[in-house]
Amino acid sequence: MKKFKHLLLALGAFLLVLGFSVPAFAQSYYGVDNSRYQGTNGQFGYARDSFNIIQLGGSYNTSVYYQSTYGSQVQSTLNQGKRAHTYIWWQDITNTGSAKYVLDTMLPRVQTPKGSIVALDAEDGGQDTDTIMYALQRIKDAGYTPMLYGYKSFLTSHVDLTRISNSYALWLGEYPSMSLTTEPNYNYFPSFNNIQIFQFTSTYVAGGLDGNYDFNGITLNGYSQGSNSTPDTNTTVTKEADKADSHQGTAVTNIETGKTTIAKDTYTVQSGDTLGSIASQFGTTYQKLASLNGISNPNFISVGQLLRVSGSASSSNSSSSSVYYVKSGDNLSSIAAKYGTSYQSLASINGISNPNYLYVGQAIKVSGSASSSSSSSSVYYVKSGDNLSTIASKYGTSYQALASLNGISNPNYLYVGQAIKVSGSASSSSTSSYTVRSGDTLSGIAYKYGVSYSNLASKNGISNANYIYEGQVIYF
């Protein structure tokens, strides 16, 4: 890492000679950003990654929506010893009234620590400088670190980016190509004032993942000495936020806004906690907490785990289930042994088609029952070296059938971790297309249609996701 920093410093000096502006390097870190495309537990690229900026939800055409994966991705990130931050999709919010409504509903749902980053993702649609300034100040007033994310070309053509960057930090993206990119390429650095994070690729790993580089340690904000186990404040989900989950994917209009109190019936596990010590804090017993939270082994709780500390356990014991989060070195057999069951039973309960494939932070139900629905389909997760033909052979089918079942238009393109349905029925929906309009970006189009923009780029032969043109036809 030190050697790489020296190389970066030398490169920075060279670029300055050429007229480029590159930030000074103090404490610097690699990391990723995740949304629902990275699944329930999120995704990291490499062991060196120390932070994850996770999508809470967003605004589109004045509607507010939430990402159902946000809470579990935050918890999984913390469980892996990494720092979690938050971002909000920010589109077509062009007045302070709309901004106030969005932030009144969003900020109480933030589950990352006070001081951590809450960024506005303004890469598409209508944008307004005064409204963004208002929103960033609201985030700051709420006790978080405000940032603005986007592409330099889009932002400079839609807002006064100089004015914004004079007061607030920037997180800008620019990619050299759609090829696998593991290090920043400063020939493509979007030179501007106050850039704190550089999103240098959307193909950090094979199959697509955003890679980021924090130049000066802004991602340490909210975490004492950079450790995720000692956040500056406890963060718990509000009651209003719990209600909001039932509105996933729809406009939310009936959530209480304004000043929202933090729920007093939950507690987030900190480093050094035991179930007994937590019980003492809340005047109860560890047995009651275990029952209340469906914990079968009171000796095992994890940092970042959200515990109910009041209320009553479900009366239906048969429907309740406790959860174990996979740690480094675990396998399904060892987890099964801890809970007095078999790996076959855990595989069935969790719909795991390949018991040899687990990942750190994965949530494993250790009690309960598998779905009895005969129409459910089994899923295979793509591993390095797989192709659609080899997967088809394992399940006694053809690659054409799997392509049809999963809506895969290019059977030669798979990515590690991709979920492949290996039984069930194909969707009847047909392939659609979209014609690019002025102001569109590939990521904005992908977001509107609920697909990954890296997949769109691959399917449409687009080598540089930053460059699409008006009138271009994009196929899904």
Image: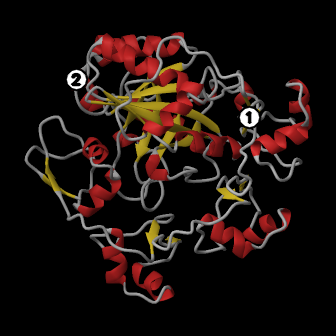
Front residue of 97 and 2: 97
Measure how far apart labels 1 and 2 are at the Cα level.
45 Å
Q: Residues within 10 Å of mark 1 (few under 14, many from 20)?
A: some
Front residue of 413 and 295: 295
Identify the coloring: secondary structure
Q: Residues within 10 Å of mark 2 (few under 14, many from 20)?
A: some
**Residue at the spot 59% in from the left edge and 38% down from the top edge:** 29
**Amino acid type of the residue tagged 1 in the rendering:** Arg
Q: x, y percentage for residue 284?
A: 89, 30
Horizontally, is 6 left or right of 253 in the view? right
Q: x, y percentage for residue 279?
A: 88, 31
**Residue at the spot 73% in from the left edge and 69% down from the top edge:** 332
- State which mark lies toward you, 1 or 2: 1
Q: Quadrant of residue 97?
A: top left
Q: Is residue 256 above or below residue 291?
A: above
Q: Secondary structure at mark 2?
A: helix
Q: Quadrant of residue 456?
A: bottom left
Residue matched to label 2: 158
Residue matched to label 1: 308
Q: x, y percentage for residue 317?
A: 74, 53
